[in-house]
Image (cartoon, helix red, strand yellow):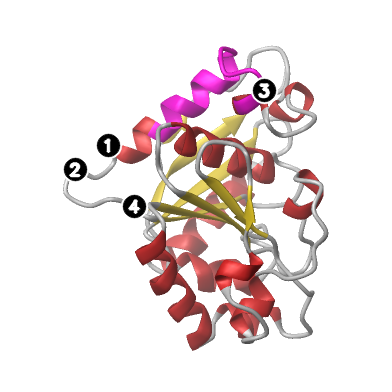
Amino acid sequence: MRHLVLNLNKKKSIKEMSKRHFVSHTNPNSQIAEQFRTIRTNIQFSSIDYKHKTLMITSPSTGEGKTTSAINLAISMSQQGDRVLLVDANLRKPTIHTSFNLKDSFGLTDVLMGRTSLKDAIFQTQIGRLEVLTSGLIPPNPTELIGSKAMSYFIKDSKEEYDVILFDSPPVLETTDTKLLAGQCDGVVLVLNSGKSDREKAAEANRMLNLVRAKVLGVILNERE
């Protein structure tokens, strides 16, 4: 498991530096924005013959900067001209709608259950070619939805419409949902907080992802002072 980037900032965590989660957009000349461009490039060159169109962003446990990383990586990819869909696949504790100040009305769950179309559920941001799909109504059966045929069809259809689809998923050690989704994605990026992540938890998260044959592209290390 290699590092996509070793250090996002030597003095402050990404959470402290990016209270609104959009540093790649609001401060594109910053060190953190440059680091996300580096991550973007490393992902692109991780496979010469095959483009990773579906990427899952996860972490061993909560509070490690996973959602902030997903948002900034999505922004960075959209800034180079890719049509990007950022999906909140955390059907238990969704946060993407809060970050973008959206009402979490129609979203992923509604698309999967046939309540609305993807076209009607997405939010068009004013950031590059970035579009957002919130989680939608919190279901009583998130694991079943993530592992359903409807989810497989959603991924297949999305890959025809978008250059990149990024899934912000729950922590890998806390739900089965993440492992089910990881097996369906082209690649997985693991976010670790050096001030919080336990080495054993990080190793266990990587082991569990390998068990479902997920392709772990690397690690984003969010370093505290």
Q: Is residue 71 magenta?
A: no
Q: Locate residue 93 relative to residue 54 in the image: left or right.
A: right
| Image coordinates for residue 8, horizontal then vertical, percent | 59, 22
For residue 52, the mark is 4
Mark sitting earlier along the chain (1/3): 3
| Image coordinates for residue 58, horizontal then vertical, percent | 59, 52
Q: Which residue is mark 2?
A: 48
What is the three-letter code of the residue carrying label 1? Answer: Phe
Mark sitting earlier along the chain (2/3): 3
The residue sitting at 16% across, 49% down in the picture is: 49
Between the C-alphas of marks 1 and 4, the distance is 10 Å
Asked whether 26 or 38 is in front, the reply is 26
What is the three-letter code of the residue carrying label 4? Answer: His
| Image coordinates for residue 201, horizontal then vertical, percent | 63, 51
What is the three-letter code of the residue carrying label 3? Answer: Thr
Task: State whether residue 60 is above or below residue 144.
Answer: above
Q: Locate residue 41 relative to residue 191 in the image: left or right.
A: left
Locate residue 116: give its quadrant: bottom right
For residue 26, the mark is 3
Locate residue 48: give its quadrant: top left
Between the C-alphas of marks 2 and 4, the distance is 10 Å
Q: Are marks 2 and 1 in contact (CB under 8 Å)?
A: yes
Residue segment shown in magenta: 25-40
Label 4 Cα crowd, 10 Å radius (few <14 / some 14-19 / many 20+) = some
The residue sitting at 73% across, 17% down in the picture is: 12
